[in-house]
Amino acid sequence: MPIPTRRFVALVAAASVVLLVLPGERWLRLLVANGALVVLAAVDWLRCARPGAIEVARQLPSAISLGGTGEIGWTVRAPQARHDVRLALADDLAPSLHASTRRFAAHVPAGGTVTASATLRPGRRGRFLLRHVVVRVHGPFRLVSRQGTIVAPATLKVLPRYRSRERAEALARSRVLDVGLRLARGRGTGTEFEQLREYTPDDETRRMDWAATARTGRPIVRAYRAERNQTVVVLLDNGRVMAGRVDGVPRVEHAMDACMALTTVAIHLADRVGLVTFDRQVRAIVPPSHRKDQLGLMSDAMYDLEPELAESDYLGAFVQATARFRRRALYVVFTELASAALDEGLLPALPVLVRHHVVLVASVRDPDVLAWAQDAAPDPDAAYRRAAAVTALAERDRSAALLRSRGAIVVDLPPDDLAMGVAEAYLRVKATGRL
């Protein structure tokens, strides 16, 4: 179907004005002029290239991290055209991708190629399916156009935001060795013998090697390092309690950031890290490994998760994880310390883990609730809000105490501190030889 262009509408309007002001038989002049314009438009439409003859290729990055940027590109060809082609293209990009543009106009030489690009700044994590590109081809006179849809399927992954990357990498470079090796040597808490060295005031006398001391005439101690190739399994709750928003994003987003920080630090210590995501059922499993691409594999397993608005099956997830990974491990459970979910779900299932493993329960604490609990404003609204916040914090402390009494380590921190708090807790577990 011919689509009139702005040039055609402007030409019709201009011709009408001119013919109306001229003397004589106006209707006859209008009839002749309109007939001429229709013929001209018909010729333009017949000479217009078919949209189906236009080839459009889309170039996309394999993945973009939430909060980062990427570039999308289009390559347009008109291999069957006998003359230059003018066209406009519109891609069906989701609004949350925040593309700098999804439309552009191009002048494609006969048999030639034209490229264009735009910047993507995703505002939402997940899988984006791109299907169609709409092409509108103008006639040589640019009076009418033909429009068609070209099928160009593609998939774009927007991975979880890794806000703590720099801090995790700095911790992996500096404090990993300091906490994982130096403390083990100084306090004798490591489990793998590394070397003999001279005694320092920080060393324990029980680590003295008396035979080496007698041979050298100097006090010599055995130096140990934290054991490597240990196993860390992250259990990421994707249920109802993780859908609540803290700092403008769901709790599960903060848990994903902390999961990636823990993975970065653990892999630098040559430990094996795995992942199990679950809600009413287990959604994804990444077997423990210390491969360099393990962080990418875990990001791929998390990027399209959306919290399931139902109660999570902790027992089912814990049983499946321990049956699959039998080696003693540090299990890190990212969940919310809501008393109802804790009493009915997590606490009854916890013995499955603590019986043979070290368990760390991590949760994000809402900084707004902390601020409300400390708000001393005299107005009644602030007083009610403060009372509710104090009650909520007391409930969280009770939940944390219950978990500790059952043998779990608890990390309950605001969003900015959660990732590093979990990594530090993991390092303490290693330094004390609990695994």
Image (cartoon, grey):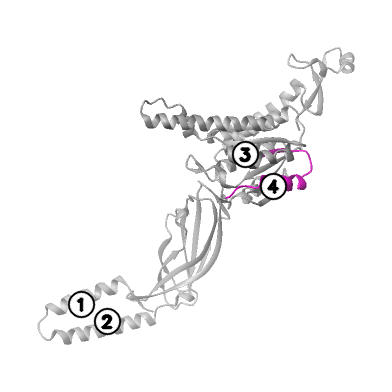
**For mark 1, what is the residue?**
15
Q: What element carries label 3?
A: helix
Q: Pinpoint residue 315: horizontal percent, then vertical percent.
A: 69, 45
Q: Is mark 4 on a helix, strand or loop?
A: helix
Is label 3 or label 1 in front? Answer: 3
Residue 301 can be seen, yes or no: yes
First along the sequence among labels 4 and 2: 2
Q: Pinpoint residue 164: horizontal percent, then vertical percent.
A: 56, 37
Going by the image, does 294 lie left or right of 219? left
Mark 1 neighbour class, 10 Å CA radius: few under 14, some 14 to 19, many 20 or more: some
Residue situated furthest left in the rendering: 23
Residue 271 can be seen, yes or no: no
Is label 4 or label 3 in front? Answer: 3
Amino acid at dot 3: Leu
Is label 4 or label 2 in front? Answer: 4
Q: Nearer the viewer, residue 376 or 368?
A: 376
Quarter containing the N terminus: bottom left
Quarter containing the C terminus: top right
**For mark 3, what is the residue?**
342
Q: Residue at x 22, y 83 (%)?
A: 33
Q: What's the CA distance linking mark 4 and mark 1?
A: 75 Å
Q: In which quarter of the image is residue 21?
A: bottom left
Going by the image, does 393 lie left or right of 235? left
Please tell me whether residue 312 belongs to the stretch shown in magenta: yes
Residue situated furthest top in the rendering: 217
Amino acid at dot 1: Ala
